[in-house]
Amino acid sequence: MTGTRADFLSTAHSAAKLLRDPAVAAAWHGPSALPEFSVAGLAGHLAYQILALPPLLTGPVPQEPTITLLEHYNRALWIGTALDDDINVRIRNGGQEISAEGPAALAARVDAALGELTGALGSTANRPVRIHLWGPWSLALDDMLVTRMMELAVHSDDLAVSVGVPTPDFPPSAVETVVDLLSRLAVRRHGPTSVLRALSRAERAPATIAAF
């Protein structure tokens, strides 16, 4: 297996290893680096990026329209919302629910899901899939994996910082995919000139080019 699917699996295995780190269990009930997220809730949200996928591969092909990767982020309701908006509260509560049985149980579920995905991703066509919570649209499987890879990379860093361990290393090609997506979203949000200046001219760089 090569390309996006191999990169997703490598990134997911790095996240799974982080979830098994004793530092995560030790800090489980404490606050994370993200406002209003406990370490447990953040770990659950990180795990969700893997746990959500096996049912998508075994379920029926969705009938909702298949849209592009960038159009997905045009429609994503969580982008630009306040910390206490309903959608962000649901995301935090969802992470807490996923992690409710504790760190060992969560890590075991993630490992089992990765076992399923390792076989399934090698034999599944690049067909439409969807997470029903998002809205009435689908993504091609490989585009879905890019969205999950970005979430895994970003939230692995969040979790590692939260518990005081090094951020996992990801394959260079996975990093390139995630940075490409974030760069495109940053250009959409801030405009090309701001992004070019941030990357090439420190004296004229804007205060931020954050993608979200």
Image (spheres, grey):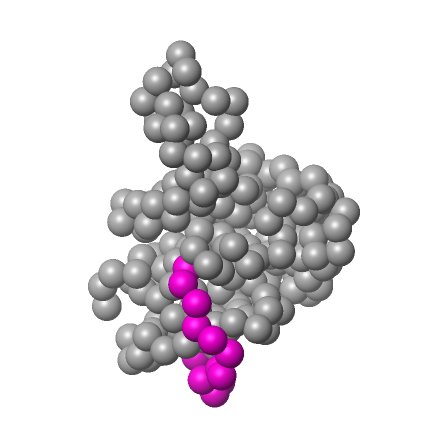
Q: Residue 60: within the magenta?
A: yes
The answer to whether residue 59 is magenta is yes
27 displayed left or right of 206 = right
**Looking at the image, residue 95 lies above or below residue 156:** below
Q: Quadrant of residue 136?
A: bottom right
Residue at 25% across / 61% down in the picture?
3
Residue 25 spot, x, y in % from top left: 62, 50
- The image shows residue 192 at horizontal and vertical percentages of 38, 34
Q: Is residue 184 left or right of residue 93?
A: left
| Residue at position x 63%, y 37% in the image | 33
Residue interval drawn in magenta: 57-69
Residue 5, placed above or below residue 184? below
Q: Report whether 29 appears left or right of 205.
A: right
For residue 173, above or below residue 100:
above
In the image, what residue occupies the spot 45% across and 43% down?
188
The one of 202 and 123 positioned closer to us in this rendering: 202
Which residue is at the front of the view, 72 or 127? 72
> Percent position (x, y) of residue 133?
62, 69
Q: In this rendering, is residue 198 above or below 84?
A: above
Count of marks placed on residues: 0
Position of the C terminus, as image quadrant, is top right
